[in-house]
Image (cartoon, rainbow, N blue to C red):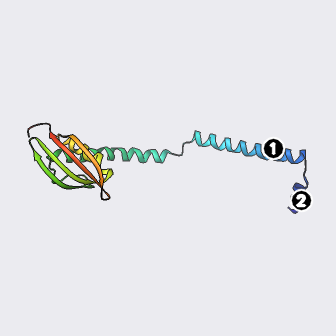
Amino acid sequence: MRVAIERLLALRGWSLTLLCGAVLAAAICLAFSLAAVSVSQPSNVPLQAQWRRILPLRATLQQRVVHSWTARHFSPLEPPVAGVALQAWQPRGRGGEMLAVVDWQAVPPLFAWLADCGVHPGAFSLNAEKGALQLSLQLERDDET
């Protein structure tokens, strides 16, 4: 082994270049053959099977969430969205004004819940006050119920 190492260290010029080229060519051929094997035999079959089991559960969960939103009537006192804390509610005609402290991530689900309840914001403002996000909504009902 020591003799082989000494011979490799003694190589200079074209001999060293040819040896390095041969090693590099062998490494490239090995890399391409491994890539071809991984393409011809997909290793993500178990992952696809997991997704096939999970996707129907996800759809069922989304239906339950939407159903629970629409099953409830609109109540500004109990918004079913996490991250929304009601500060004030002033009823007016077919709607009212809602003031709440919200988390940024709770804003899109809050608007989705309002739409599902048939309540739409005529106007809204979102302001940062005292390290919290203050949301003001002018709400209007679609129907008289």
Residue 120 position within the rendered picture, expressed as x and y whole percent measured from the top left:
19, 40
Q: Secondary structure at mark 1?
A: helix
Residue type of the residue flagged with mark 2: Glu
**Quarter of the N terminus within the rendering:** bottom right
Q: Nearer the viewer, residue 112 or 38?
A: 112
Dividing the picture into quadrants, the one containing residue 48 is top left
Q: Nearer the viewer, residue 87 or 74?
A: 87
Q: Nearer the viewer, residue 35 or 96?
A: 96
Outermost residue toward the top in this view: 142
Query: Is residue 55 visible in the rendered structure shown here?
Result: yes
Outermost residue toward the bottom in this view: 2
Measuring 89% from the left and 46% from the top, which residue is drawn there? 15
Q: Is residue 11 left or right of residue 34?
A: right
Question: Does label 1 or label 2 sit earlier along the sequence?
Answer: 2
Query: Is residue 61 visible in the rendered structure shown here?
Result: no
Residue 137 position within the rendered picture, expressed as x and y whole percent measured from the top left:
21, 45
**Circle 1 crowding by C-alpha within 10 Å: few under 14, some 14–19, many from 20:** few
Q: Secondary structure at mark 2?
A: helix
Q: Quickly name the residue at label 2.
A: 6
Residue type of the residue flagged with mark 1: Gly
Circles 1 and 2: CB atoms closer than 8 Å: no
Q: Nearer the viewer, residue 109 or 24?
A: 109
Q: Is residue 94 left or right of residue 4?
A: left
Q: Quickly name the residue at label 1.
A: 21
Q: Is residue 89 left or right of residue 54?
A: left
Q: CA distance from mark 1 to mark 2?
A: 20 Å
**Circle 2 crowding by C-alpha within 10 Å: few under 14, some 14–19, many from 20:** few
**Quarter of the C terminus within the rendering:** top left
Measuring 87% from the left and 48% from the top, which residue is drawn there? 16
| Picture disc at residue 108 | none
Residue 51 position within the rendered picture, expressed as x and y whole percent measured from the top left:
41, 45
